[in-house]
Image (tube, rainbow, N blue to C red):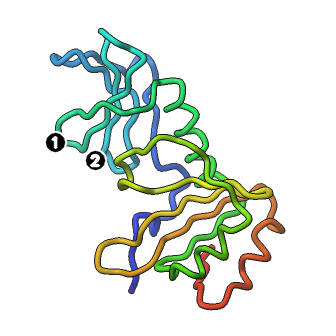
Amino acid sequence: MLTSRWDKRINFMTKMLAPERIRLADDGKAIFMIDSTGDWRWCFDLANPATVFEAGLHGPWEKMAERVSQFLVHSTVREAVFGAGFRMHALSVPDDILRAIIAPMEQVGFDEWNWPEPGYRILMGEGTLAIVAESVPGQLGWDIEIGAFEASALSELEGFSGVDWRK
């Protein structure tokens, strides 16, 4: 059975902390967002609050290329895919089929994050948002998650041969 980071089908992948829950740590960092499993975190430094850092639960903080303002837009667009009223995903989509699926879409120019893994991309199409990432290690192809505001925006994607769409 294929597995991926999206199998749990939760609506949102990250959680912003309420301002009153944000605490300053000894290293001067203030965690303001965590992933749904609590394994990944994002913070800012009081000495430079426009800079965002990310890290795995026990890893060192790494400075991100995005400033807080771009990071918040990136995070919001990413969450819109998982929070969309209509969604479907497919695992291990071959390269040629993925190219056909995303051909009418345009990649959104965000800087790279290390979570959920380096190299994932966000794309926009007519009424759709998509996240594309390499399949989990040991599996060929690409995992794709597509969200839409109307079911009709997803209907033509269901016709791709060789893709096992799951809703």
From this viewpoint, which residue is outermost toward the bottom? Answer: 161
| Label number found at residue 39 | 2
Q: Residue at x 41, y 56 (%)?
A: 119
Name the N-terminal-most of marks 1 and 2.
2
What is the crowding at mark 1: few (fewer than 14 residues within 10 Å), some, or many (at least 20)? few
The quadrant the C terminus occupies is bottom right
As drawn, is 122 to the left or to the right of 21?
right
Q: Secondary structure at mark 2?
A: loop
Q: Which residue is mark 1?
A: 58
The quadrant the N terminus occupies is bottom left
How far separated are the C-alphas under marks 1 and 2? 8 Å
Q: Position of residue 156 (x, y in %)?
A: 79, 77
What is the crowding at mark 2: few (fewer than 14 residues within 10 Å), some, or many (at least 20)? few
Q: Position of residue 162 (x, y in %)?
A: 59, 90
Is residue 85 visible in the rendered image? The answer is no
As drawn, is 82 to the left or to the right of 33?
right
